[in-house]
Image: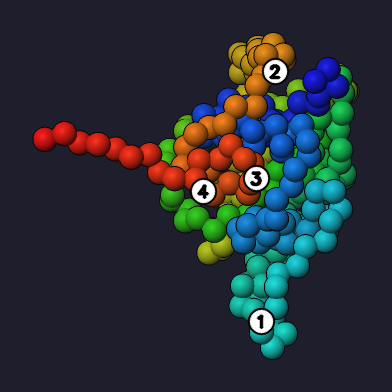
Amino acid sequence: MNDFKISQSALRDFYNPEVCRIKWEEMYVNGYRSQPTTAMLDGLVFEQNVIGLSRGGEIYEIPKGKTGNTLKRETDLLKLSEDAKQTMKDLDIELIDVQPHWEIGDLVGHPDALVKYKGELAIMDLKYTGVREDESCRWNPFAWADLQHKDFKQALHYSEMYYLTHGVFVPFFYLVFGKSGWCKFILIDYTDKAMTEYRILLNKFRKDLKSFEPKPIKNYSICRKCPVLCDKRTTKPTIETIKL
């Protein structure tokens, strides 16, 4: 894999014990793409309505009802999108480059947007979520409360790429909108120590990738939900025997 490009998601999932090695290879080496889940589709439609594009320039649509009518799901999403655009105006956020494709060396990145925030360049990641505002990411990695438990390597990855390309660090922030109408502006103020540790992790990944083997995870709970229908998936739960 000498020409492998390191994305923040490939790095994240490589060290996630719940991501099967076969699935990882299919997704990040062979380019497998599954159909978006309902939650993912809502996020993609929200994103393209707020900033004008989804990653890759693909156009996504919420399915219509049986009679071709617009569902409340879509109406609510479009209403929130308009609220989000107004919130960006109120925060003095100006879009500069939407869904750019960045490559430098063996790193690749797809930030949502390079923006000006109060007149200064910054990297913005736009998020839509159906979770409650107070749901803890200690128990749900997709939640946005108790943020000390959340993984923010995405911010480090994109900030490092911008630095390697332009020689300067720019701020990174998340703009998160909840289905129920809540919003969070999360500015990532990382230290030199955090960036150094991320660079160490990148080098560890480069080394570990050389000995990578696509072994099955052998976990029925994970395999039964996996869209990659490989011939090594575990199709039956493990039998547990209790002796009395």
- In the picture, the disc for residue 209 is 2
At numbered mark 3, what does the secondary structure look like: helix, strand or loop? loop
Q: Nearer the viewer, mark 2 or mark 1?
A: 2
What amino acid is labelled 1 in the image? Gly
Q: Viewer-proximal residue, 181 or 101?
A: 101
- Assess whether mark 1 and mark 2 are in contact (beta carbons under 8 angstroms): no
Q: Is residue 208 visible?
A: yes
Please, is residue 236 above or below residue 189 in the view?
below
Question: Residue placed at 74% from the left, 34% from the top?
Answer: 28
What amino acid is labelled 3 in the image? Val
C-alpha separation, residue under disc 2 versus residue under disc 4: 26 Å
At numbered mark 1, what does the secondary structure look like: helix, strand or loop? loop
**Extreme-left residue of the structure:** 244
- In the picture, the disc for residue 76 is none
Q: Nearer the viewer, mark 2 or mark 4?
A: 4
What amino acid is labelled 4 in the image? Arg
C-alpha separation, residue under disc 2 versus residue under disc 1: 46 Å
Please, is residue 72 above or below residue 82 in the view?
below
- In the picture, the disc for residue 224 is 4
Callout 1 environment at 10 Å: few (<14), some (14 to 19), or many (20+)?
Answer: few
What amino acid is labelled 2 in the image? Leu
Q: Is residue 158 visible?
A: no
Does residue 199 appear left or right of residue 16 in this picture? right
- Assess whether mark 3 and mark 1 are in contact (beta carbons under 8 angstroms): no
Question: Residue placed at 87% from the left, 45% from the top?
Answer: 96
C-alpha separation, residue under disc 4 versus residue under disc 1: 29 Å
Q: Which residue is mark 1?
A: 65
C-alpha separation, residue under disc 1 versus residue under disc 3: 29 Å
Question: Residue placed at 68% from the left, 55% from the top?
Answer: 36
Q: Viewer-proximal residue, 157 or 96?
A: 157
Does residue 79 appear left or right of residue 136 in this picture? right
C-alpha separation, residue under disc 2 versus residue under disc 3: 21 Å
